[in-house]
Amino acid sequence: MTSKYKIKVGIIGGSGLNNPNFFKDEKELDIITPFGKPSDVLISGKIENVDCVLLARHGRQHTISPTNVNYRANIWALKMAGCTHVIASSASGSLQEEIKPGDMVVVDSFIDRTTKRNSSFYDGTVDAAKGVCHIPMEPAFCNKTRQIMIKAAQDLGIAVHTSGTSVSIEGPRFSSRAESNLYRSWGVHLVNMTLVPEVVLAKEAGLCYAVVAMATDYDCWRISEEGVNVCDVLKTFKENVEKITKLFLKVVPKIAEENWDETIDSLKASVESSVMLPQTKK
Ligand SMILES: CSC[C@H]1O[C@H](OP(=O)(O)O)[C@H](O)[C@@H]1O
Ligand SMILES: Nc1ncnc2[nH]cnc12
């Protein structure tokens, strides 16, 4: 389909998807951004002839904690690599009975309970991000990309929840039972440690961004559960990782079939209209 944008898809692999084998011919890109180094090299390659780059959110050896991930460098690096889209995975705790471990959720909103993160490019340090940016967060995720993800999951027979709110906590500790119940009382569906500020920065960067969350545990609100631990999280993720890899392999070519001119133009316009430039004195 003719489009003014050359589609390139960034794939951010979260916990359990640190080093997936998506590409036949891959190349490592060692990128440094004005915000520092991303979590690891970018791996570039193609999925069915569509240009892609892969980035391990916590590094390929999973050495970077959720707090210490350089989210700004990660998103900026994907933008520098020419990505128009970013699809990401997130291992998440379920806060609702009907979201069972192993289920996928294509999240559509978030609550921010992080405390130690840079969540804007626009902090006066970089010329390319001049001014103060008050980016709108509705819609937080790219709806068109989300719908492609949902349809692809349904076609693959994956148990997928078509919407959901996820609360991002600072971590690296898991929530207390009181916190877990508080989030449930807010009607939240999932808990994670990385969605924020990734989603915010992707929006500031004008990227079509969508996340598939995999419920790996019931967090600790559920009386019948012992609570969450990292071994169980990774065990459930491993048992279900094939679903996410199949999903991404199906989503990428579907993205490339669409015309994104209107979506990308509107994301760009949203950023432009959100930036307040320094006032010049009269
Ligand atoms: C490994 S348990 C907690 C850890 O897992 C999730 O990571 P990601 O979102 O990168 O898949 C969660 O957000 C925590 O960072
Ligand atoms: N219960 C949980 N809380 C926060 N992050 C998680 N990632 C996976 N399970 C989680």
Image (cartoon, rainbow, N blue to C red):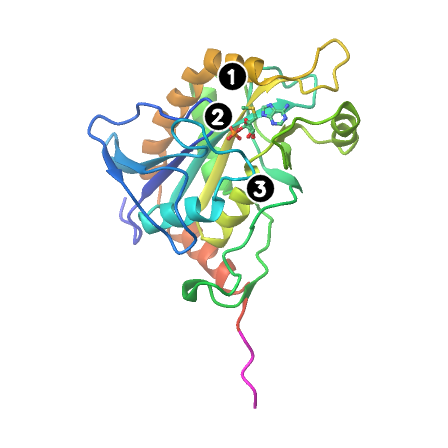
Residue bounds of the magenta highlight: 278-282
Provide residue 135's location: percent of width, then percent of height: 57, 56
Magenta part mainly helix, strand or loop?
loop
Tag 2: amino acid: Ser
Is residue 164 positioned above or below 76 on the image?
above
Q: Quadrant of the N terminus?
A: top left
Q: Which residue is mark 2?
A: 15
Q: Which residue is mark 1?
A: 234
Q: Nearer the viewer, residue 225 or 47?
A: 225
Kind of element beneath mark 1: helix
Crowd around label 3: few <14 · some 14–19 · many ≥20 (10 Å): many
Tag 3: amino acid: Val
Instruction: Measure the C-alpha gap from mark 2 to mark 1.
Output: 8 Å
Kind of element beneath mark 3: helix
Q: Which residue is mark 3?
A: 196
Provide residue 85's location: percent of width, then percent of height: 39, 43
* Residue 156 - label: none
Q: Residue at x 42, y 24 (%)?
A: 17
Instruction: Measure the C-alpha gap from mark 1 to mark 3.
Output: 21 Å
Tag 1: amino acid: Leu
| Disc 3 to disc 2: CB gap under 8 Å | no
Crowd around label 1: few <14 · some 14–19 · many ≥20 (10 Å): some
| Disc 2 to disc 1: CB gap under 8 Å | yes
Instruction: Measure the C-alpha gap from mark 3 to mark 2.
Output: 15 Å
Disc 2 or 1, which lies upstream in sequence? 2
Provide residue 134's location: percent of width, then percent of height: 59, 60
Disc 1 or 3, which lies upstream in sequence? 3
